[in-house]
Amino acid sequence: MKTVDNFNFKNKRALIRVDFNVPLDEKFNVSDDTRIRAAIPTIKKILSDGGSVVLMSHLGRPKEGPTEKYSLKHIVNHLEKLLGTPVKFTDDCIGESAKKLSLNLKNGEVLLLENLRFYKQEEKGDEAFAKKLSELGNFYVNDAFGTAHRAHASTAVIATFFPDAKCFGYVMSGELASINKVMNKSAKPFTAIMGGAKVSDKILILEQLIKKADNIIIGGGMAFTFVKAQGGKIGKSMVEEEKIEIAKTILDEAKKKGVNIYIPVDAIIADNFSNDANKKHCEIKNIPDGWMGLDIGAETEKIFSDVISKSKTILWNGPMGVFEMSNFEHGTKAVANAVAECTSKGAFSLIGGGDSVAAINKYKLADKVSYVSTGGGALLEYIESGTLPGVDAIEK
């Protein structure tokens, strides 16, 4: 794997694809700078070598060209504070102004381009657009794992214009090394914790995990499809009726391969999808009509925590319940604490997926786990397929 550590960037103008797709508040201030902070070490390495940096990213999902609320100019001040150096900005990502500013960059200087997705050609993977971007640097670095699963102009196509001058940044290399450690070099027992709303989002990843994991824990809304597949009564809990047969197949396959699948045995149920709803505890296979499961129960917490505590490798993707509501966050918090506790005893833990990362951050446990992925969809797709367009483009 070629990373920025394999090169000296003195007098080089590095064109870096970063993932600065960060949330902004109503005053356009950055409200969560996790992704920006993640890219800082790569940028600083190149600057310290004596190179200059041209940064390109997307922000949000602009539908019709330039849009004020999606302009990357809003993050310039925040980026300058984190980098400790001035950041130039151009109100376009191609064209004469962008080209002139990039070509005139001095060693040690940083330029941020305007939102790539103001051009539809970016998402279409347009080669001519990628060529124009490529003219802004003489070395290409992909450090945007969160978008590596998209074959966009700036993440995959552009690399063809840098046949011998391309590599991964620290974010990308760290993500790939962590996933490889979990999926291909895992210390046993390997426990995968799968949560979230839908089985349909996790079918392919579950099929891969059955080949690799010793234990698979299933929680969140997706658990009710499995409970119903086993003949349970789930009231008005979330269920994907069309996926019940697939759930049965997954359970059968796991049994054949000797993989333990753990499904909740009890739940905290509510009569409405609200934090203020009436709630009570019951067996997960006997939820009354008119009630829905919104969190795992105490007995399930104990079972899940016990499995996690005996693990040497842990992958966690998806919450155990509606953790955004204080009355239904206990299960997710219990699992988060169990993962952190096991990590402190030497296990390797990879946290991936927006909601799992949000939970780890909410409970202030990010520094108590081994690795927190910056790319939810990219992480899942990489596990499912074993590669990504943005990875292939560098490794070719």
Image (cartoon, rainbow, N blue to C red):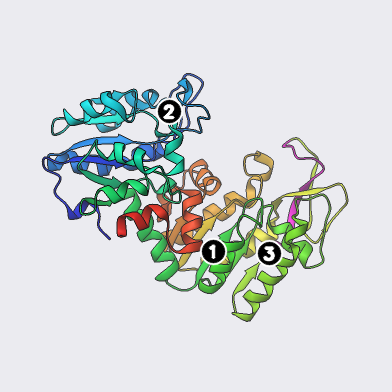
Q: Viewer-nearest of labels 2 and 3?
A: 2
Q: Is-magenta flag for residue 159?
A: no
Above or below, 1 against 23 in this view is below
**Which residue lies under the disc numbered 2?**
30
Q: CA distance from mark 3 to mark 1?
A: 12 Å
Q: Quadrant of the C terminus?
A: bottom left
Instruction: Quarter of the image for the N terminus: give it.
Output: bottom left
> Which span is picked out in magenta?
263-275
**Residue at (52%, 41%) from the top-left corner?**
362
Q: Position of residue 121 (x, y in %)?
A: 43, 37
Q: Position of residue 22 (x, y in %)?
A: 44, 34
Going by the numbered disc 1, the residue's amino acid type is Ala
Asked if 68 appears above or below 368 in the picture, the reply is: above
Q: Which residue corresponds to the image point at 33% horizontal and 25% vertical from the top-left?
A: 76
Residue furthest to the front:
128
Q: Does the magenta-highlighted stretch encompass residue 266?
A: yes
Q: Which mark is residue 318?
A: none
> Does residue 322 appear to the left or right of 115 in the view shown?
right
Residue 296: image quadrant is bottom right
Q: Residue type at mark 3? A: Ile
Measuring from the top left, give residue 17's x and y in whole percent: 33, 42
What residue lies at 21% left-to-right and 26% top-to-bottom?
Answer: 100
Q: Which residue is mark 1?
A: 192
SS label for mark 1: strand
Separation of residues labelled 1 and 2 (CA atoms): 32 Å
What residue is disc 3 on? 263
